[in-house]
Amino acid sequence: MVASGAYGDLYKGTYCSQEVAIKVLKAERVNTDMQKEFAQEVYIMRKVRHKNVVQFIGACTKPPSLCIVTEFMSGGSVYDYLHKHKGVFKLPSLLKVAIDISKGMNYLHQNNIIHRDLKAANLLMDENEVVKVADFGVARVKTQSGVMTAETGTYRWMAPEVIEHKPYDHKADVFSFAIVLWELLTGKVNPQSPTVSFRFGFSDRLPSNVATNPAFPFFLVSQLPYEYLTPLQAAVGVVQKGLRPTIPKHSNPKLAELLERCWQQDPARRPDFSEIIENLQQIAKEVGDDLGDGRKEKSHGGFLSVLRRSHH
């Protein structure tokens, strides 16, 4: 077993000589909503195939044995790299990660799929330092009208229009990408102090034993912005006051400008991922990193070297 959570367990296995990840839902925790979410994830993953999207292998969809098999991502999540292993992305590697994410998301959007829960924990890295988009439990195929109204995903990454229950489209993912980009720049958890999720109905109140509770390790990793606000207060700030995290002063100016465009209050003013890719590639070129040369930083250990060293 690789990991265990309240709703399922993750195993590592082998299928046709390929290492695979097997996500098994706990039968006693499966309800109608979870079955629908699981079926949607399988439906979406069967449709997609891209080098920056985690590859679907197979699934068992008959209750109570619900499981999904995907390629095994040995590098773990971007979230774990940043917060559990104290990893830091130098600018060339950061741009490579951002481009990988953008290419995966651009592919999804070209296929009318809105992810709706883009965050560092749902971005996985393989042994070749390629980042791939994962976790399609709340992803949806865009309707013919092009807009959606269901509130979903993780509160801290939600676009203002989603928080407000307004119709939204693929540009909601662009806002979430901006928060991910901010995480990459700062190495911090995310812009709203402690967690809340409409998806599983978490409380917006912290337990009294948070300092010793192993279920909440991410609160203790680094100081959070907006720490004086509850998640709900921060969400109100995002919607009503245009509240955003502080971009580090040392950030590349063009990257900071792109980030600000991605979290614009008006979705129409946010770029789409094809434009984001072009911008990121241009920035990468300007900082002297040719992303097609075998990744220069790899000769110095690469950004996964921290992970590898942590296991020895």
Image (cartoon, helix red, strand yellow):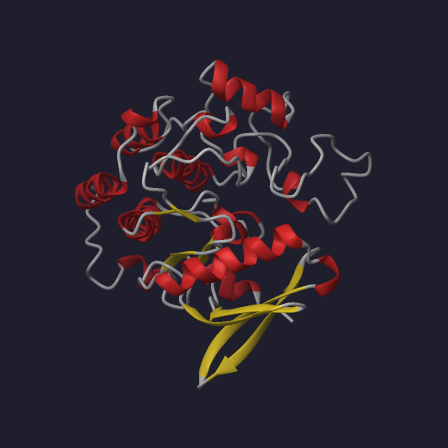
Quick check: 304 left or right of 227? Answer: left
Quick check: 34 left or right of 74? Answer: right
Q: Residue furthest top?
A: 241
Specify whether residue 273 is in view.
Answer: yes
Question: Which x, y percent locates residue 20?
Answer: 49, 74
Question: Which x, y percent locates residue 108?
Answer: 33, 51
Residue 7, picture quadrant? bottom right
Residue 229, picture quadrant? top right
Task: Establish if 70 lies above or below 275.
Answer: below
Residue at point 39%, 33% (across, down): 175
Task: Establish if 265 lies above or below 294.
Answer: above
Task: Establish if 43 lies above or below 265.
Answer: below
Residue 154, picture quadrant? top right
Residue at point 34%, 58% (across, down): 52
Question: Which x, y percent locates residue 224?
Answer: 58, 31
Residue at point 60%, 32% (across, down): 223
Q: Nearer the viewer, residue 53 or 78?
A: 53
Specify whether residue 125 is in view.
Answer: no
Question: Which x, y percent locates residue 307?
Answer: 51, 61
Quick check: 33 left or right of 43? Answer: right
Q: Residue furthest front?
A: 144
Q: Quadrant of the N terminus?
A: bottom right
Quick check: 27 left or right of 61? Answer: right
Q: Residue furthest right?
A: 208
Q: Quadrant of the C terminus?
A: bottom right
